[in-house]
Image (spheres, rainbow, N blue to C red):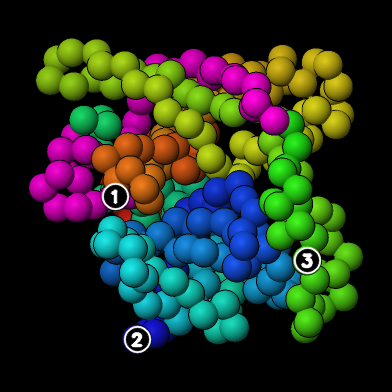
């Protein structure tokens, strides 16, 4: 049964082809009561522009529990989406909202998954390195491309004129370390964050053969020197004991952000 909720948008994953929706993405959000939500599927690029929300905005929409057994998983009535905030909230407000969802390590988050079923959460790695692997195929299969290029009967003009979704020719991973019970434990997980995918596409278009240098300059060098990087983790649908990095959260390193972490409601 659908119920209206106010949702604070945390991240969107890079879209994938879909038989039923042409293309879809997964959205992570948090309610006013502090409950995490996995909203899936959303054909985000096919929505009217007035319903295309941004990260760090509040929206309202009707949602209901999906058939997915993970407790955060919901589906959305896209016709009911309303954007409540004119612009994304600033970093102090963002961090105040998400702070209760931050775990010290992936081991702690996974122990919580085993005990409670929670399949979304935020961790703070102690160090990290970006790893890049080339995809076996750089193009969509004919079936995937057919799904992506279908037109809907009632598509608005802006949707009909959309560019076909580009396949990312590379996979991006973080190999990272967490401090767990006085030990350093290493992990490696795939990044599915839409922003990371778009960063690659923009770097490839602007810098050509130097794209990797520019990409690493942001996702490794800048994040490790100017930002305080957190990973929004989510489990896989088919393998619910395996994790993905579904979102990158990177507040700037400054006194305002650090001081705001434990002061909900602070306005700057």
Does label 3 or label 1 sit earlier along the sequence?
1
Residue at position x 69%, y 51% from top? Answer: 144
Q: Position of residue 268 (x, y in %)?
A: 50, 53
Q: What element does badge 3 sit on?
A: loop
Of badges 2 and 3, nearer the viewer stands: 3
Few, some or many residues within 10 Å of mark 3 (<14, 14–19, 20+): few
Identify the magenta region.
108-137
Query: Could you say which disc has been placed on residue 119 in the image?
Result: 1
Does label 1 or label 2 sit earlier along the sequence?
2
Q: What element does badge 2 sit on?
A: loop
Q: Is residue 178 above or below residue 195?
A: above
Inter-mark Cα distance, 1 to 2: 22 Å
Few, some or many residues within 10 Å of mark 1 (<14, 14–19, 20+): many
Q: Nearer the viewer, residue 266 or 29?
A: 29
Few, some or many residues within 10 Å of mark 2 (<14, 14–19, 20+): few
The answer to the question of whether label 1 and label 2 lie on touching residues, with beta carbons closer than 8 A, is no
The answer to the question of whether label 3 and label 1 lie on touching residues, with beta carbons closer than 8 A, is no
Q: What element does badge 1 sit on?
A: loop
| Residue 237 inside the magenta-drawn segment | no
The answer to the question of whether label 2 and label 3 lie on touching residues, with beta carbons closer than 8 A, is no
Query: Could you say which disc has been placed on residue 150 in the image?
Result: 3
Q: Is residue 149 left or right of residue 88?
A: right
Q: Is residue 208 left or right of residue 56?
A: right
Q: Residue beneath label 2, please?
A: 1
């Amino acid at each position: 049964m659908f119920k209206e909720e106010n949702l604070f948008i945390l991240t969107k994953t890079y879209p994938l082809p879909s038989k039923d929706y042409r293309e879809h993405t997964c959205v992570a959000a948090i309610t006013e009561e502090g409950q995490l939500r996995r909203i899936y599927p959303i054909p985000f690029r096919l929505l009217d522009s007035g319903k295309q929300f941004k990260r760090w905005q509040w929206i309202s929409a009707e949602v209901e529990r999906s058939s997915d057994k993970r407790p955060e998983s919901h589906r959305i009535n896209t016709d009911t989406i309303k954007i409540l905030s004119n612009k994304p909230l600033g970093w102090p407000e963002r961090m105040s909202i998400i702070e209760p969802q931050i775990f010290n390590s992936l081991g702690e988050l996974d122990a919580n998954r085993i005990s409670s079923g929670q399949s979304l959460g935020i961790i703070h790695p102690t160090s990290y390195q970006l790893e890049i692997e080339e995809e076996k195929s750089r193009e969509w299969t004919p079936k995937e491309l057919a799904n992506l290029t279908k037109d809907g009967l009632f598509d608005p003009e802006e949707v009909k004129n959309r560019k076909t979704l580009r396949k990312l020719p590379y996979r991006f991973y973080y190999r990272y370390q967490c401090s767990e019970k006085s030990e350093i434990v290493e992990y490696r997980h795939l990044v599915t964050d839409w922003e990371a995918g778009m960063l690659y596409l923009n770097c490839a278009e602007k810098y050509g053969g130097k794209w990797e240098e520019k990409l690493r300059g942001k996702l490794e060098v800048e994040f490790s020197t100017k930002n305080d990087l957190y990973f929004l983790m989510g489990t896989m649908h088919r393998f619910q004991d395996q994790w993905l990095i579904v979102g990158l959260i990177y507040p700037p390193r400054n006194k305002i952000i650090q001081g705001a972490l434990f002061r909900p409601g602070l306005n700057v």
